[in-house]
Image (cartoon, grey):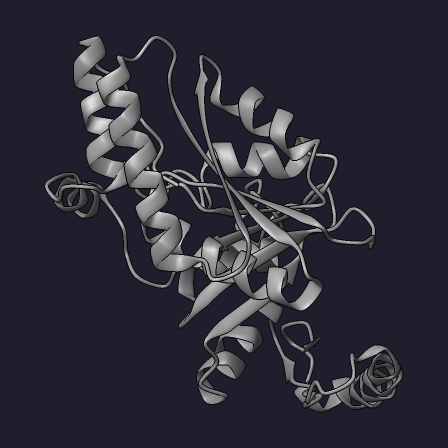
Amino acid sequence: IVEVPEGMPLSGGANRARQARRLLQKVMDYVPEGTVIHPLVRIGRHASEGIIEAAAEQEADLIIFGWGGKAAPGRDGGSPVISATIDEAVRDAPCDIAVVKQRGAREIRRILVPVRGGPHAELALRFADALAHRHGARVAVLHLVPAGVTEAVRAQAEHALAQFIRQHVTAEAEPLLREAQNVRTAILREADKSDLVVMGASAPPGEHGASLFGALPESIAQRAKATVIIVKTHEPIGRQTFEQLAQRAETLAAADRAAEESRAIPTRVDRW
């Protein structure tokens, strides 16, 4: 997207558009064999609007962004979560979103996917499964339960995790059920043993708009040593989604509820 400031005619971006097209032609040299690429250059006032319009016109199923580093202030003067362009595009995107925090290309042998069983987690597993087949990797699917749960609750969680993996993973899979006091620390510990982390956005029940992807996935992306991909489905997800999942036997949401009830401690849980 070639951005042209307000007050300047859009035709003023023609030279930069030609330069952008030449740059995209150079990118074609790095395209993996068998991958079809369609270079597209747009001139507009704001990059996010151009991305959203292009995604709608192309009937895209997915938009992938790279997450560079510290974000610059947004158009409204506020501090964006990832970047002003990505934040704005994510809010209005007509399709699924993936944001990649890249930390160098290397051989991918183990892909970590932390899950709590919601739709974002399903999308994360679809990503991980496709990447695992591409690279001959295995998918380590991590589910965390509170420390000190009963054997019955742990067995329920193990069964639910196995079911979730069977439904969404066709590559070699490694189920990981861990007890943890600190969720972030536990995920980062497993991330240190992995080449790639794929994680669904968190959907805190009853809290909309507080964070684009959720505090936990954003923290993992910033702190993990491996490359991290955060994915977010286009469908709205809230408390009702997880209430419905918790009513169904053999789901991770039902296992989580059993764990919370067994400890009799009310908790605010990020559902990723």
Viewport quadrant of the N terminus:
bottom right
Camera-nearest residue between 189 and 8: 189
In screen coordinates, is 150 left or right of 12?
left
The image position of residue 265, as x and y in percent, is: 22, 10
Residue extending farthest to the left is 247
Residue under the image location 67 percent in, 45 percent down: 71
The image position of residue 79, as x and y in percent, is: 58, 40
Residue under the image location 16 percent in, 38 percent down: 246
Residue under the image location 20 percent in, 27 percent down: 257
In screen coordinates, is 84 left or right of 105?
left
Position of residue 165 relative to residue 89, above or below, is above
Camera-nearest residue between 157 and 29: 157
Camera-nearest residue between 39 and 250: 250
* Residue 86, quarter of the rendered image: bottom right
* Residue 114 seen in the figure: yes
The image position of residue 247, as x and y in percent, is: 10, 41
Position of residue 94 relative to residue 157, above or below, is below
* Residue 135, quarter of the rendered image: bottom right
The image position of residue 8, as x and y in percent, is: 69, 80
Position of residue 261 relative to residue 115, above or below, is above
